[in-house]
Image: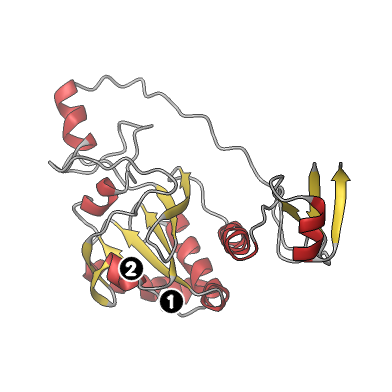
C-alpha cells in the first residue's frame, strides 16, 4: 500500500547526473609511498556511516578556534571540504554557498568549509571569492594544512595516486557531510576534485531530511518542498487520514 500526502506543487529541482566511474592509475607506486600519503595520521581512521556520530575535532578557522561539536550546538550543520585555496572550482563553490547562506539560516543550518591551507591563505582567498562572486562570505573556513581533519573524515583522494602534495599527502576531495543537532551524520556526498557541487541539491536534501524528521514521512525522487510526500507503509490509510488529512491512496 502506498499513500501519498498531497501538497501544492512548486518547482525547484535539478536533474541528477551520474557520478564518474573511478579511474585506476597506471602509475606504479611502492607500498611504502602508498602508505605515506594514504595514512597521514597514526590515529585509526573512523568508519563513517549514516547514523554514526560525526567525529569531533578542534580546529583553527577564519572565525577563531572551535570545538566542532560545541560549535554545532543545537543546530544542523554542513561541513564541506575543498582541495585547496584559490582553485577555480572551489572559488565558485564557496561563492555559491555564500549567496545561498540566508536560505540555510532559515532552516537553522550552520555552514563550515574546510580547505588544506593555513589561515593567512584563507583570508586572502575569501577576498578573492567575494570579488569574483560579488558576495560576502560570512561562514567559517577551517584551516587543515596537515589534512588531519580530512583524514578523520576520509576526505582524501584514492582514485588518482598522483594527486599528492610535496609532503606525499593526498589532496582533499569535495566532500559534504550533513550533521544533525544530535551530531549524527545524516547524509554524505563525495565529488572528485574536477566536479563542482550543486548548492540547490544540498539545500534540497536538507529540506527532505528535516521534513521527514518533523512529519514522519518519506520523500520521492526529485522532491522539493510543496510537492507530495509518501506516508510510510507502517501507517494505515485511516490513521494517515487522521494524522495528515489530505491523503491519496495510490495502491490499496
Residue 225: name its quadrant. Answer: bottom right
Callout 1 crowding tier (Cα within 10 Å): few <14, some 14–19, many ≥20: some
For marks 1 and 2, give the CA distance.
Answer: 10 Å
Mark sitting on residue 141: 2
User: Quick check: marks 1 and 2 in contact, CB under 8 Å?
Assistant: yes
At 77% across and 57% down in the image, what residue appears?
A: 240
Callout 2 crowding tier (Cα within 10 Å): few <14, some 14–19, many ≥20: many
Residue 5 placement, left or right of 124: right
The quadrant in which the C terminus is found is top right
The quadrant in which the N terminus is found is top right
Instruction: Establish if 154 lies above or below 64.
Output: above
Residue under pointer 1: 137
Instruction: For mark 2, give the secondary structure.
Output: strand
Instruction: Establish if 191 lies above or below 62.
Output: above
Residue 239: name its quadrant. Answer: bottom right
- Rendering coords of residue 150 (x, y %): 28, 50
Residue 3 placement, left or right of 50: right
- Rendering coords of residue 234 (x, y %): 69, 46
- Rendering coords of residue 245 (x, y %): 82, 66
Amino acid at each position: 500500500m502506498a499513500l501519498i500526502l498531497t501538497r501544492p506543487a512548486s518547482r525547484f529541482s535539478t536533474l541528477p547526473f551520474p557520478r564518474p566511474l573511478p579511474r585506476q592509475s597506471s602509475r606504479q607506486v611502492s607500498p611504502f609511498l602508498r602508505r605515506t600519503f594514504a595514512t597521514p595520521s597514526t590515529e585509526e581512521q573512523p568508519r563513517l556511516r549514516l547514523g554514526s556520530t560525526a567525529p569531533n575535532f578542534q580546529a583553527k578557522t577564519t572565525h577563531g578556534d572551535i570545538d566542532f561539536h560545541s560549535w554545532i550546538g543545537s543546530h544542523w550543520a554542513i561541513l564541506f571540504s575543498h582541495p585547496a585555496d584559490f582553485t577555480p572550482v572551489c572559488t565558485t563553490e564557496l561563492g555559491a554557498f555564500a549567496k545561498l547562506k540566508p536560505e540555510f539560516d532559515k532552516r537553522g543550518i550552520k555552514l563550515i568549509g574546510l580547505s588544506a591551507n593555513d589561515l593567512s591563505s584563507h583570508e586572502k582567498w575569501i577576498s578573492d571569492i567575494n570579488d569574483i562572486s560579488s558576495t560576502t562570505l560570512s561562514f567559517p573556513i577551517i584551516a587543515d594544512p596537515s589534512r588531519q581533519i580530512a583524514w578523520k573524515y576520509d576526505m582524501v583522494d584514492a582514485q588518482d595516486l598522483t594527486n599528492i602534495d610535496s609532503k606525499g599527502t593526498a589532496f582533499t576531495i569535495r566532500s559534504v557531510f550533513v550533521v544533525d543537532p544530535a551530531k549524527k551524520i545524516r547524509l554524505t556526498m563525495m565529488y572528485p576534485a574536477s566536479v563542482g557541487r550543486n548548492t540547490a541539491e544540498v539545500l534540497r536534501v536538507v529540506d527532505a531530511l528535516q521534513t521527514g524528521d518533523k512529519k514522519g514521512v518519506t520523500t520521492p525522487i526529485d522532491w522539493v518542498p510543496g510537492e507530495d510526500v509518501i506516508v510510510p507503509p507502517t501507517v494505515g490509510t485511516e490513521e494517515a487520514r487522521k494524522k495528515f488529512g489530505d491523503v491519496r491512496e495510490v495502491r490499496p
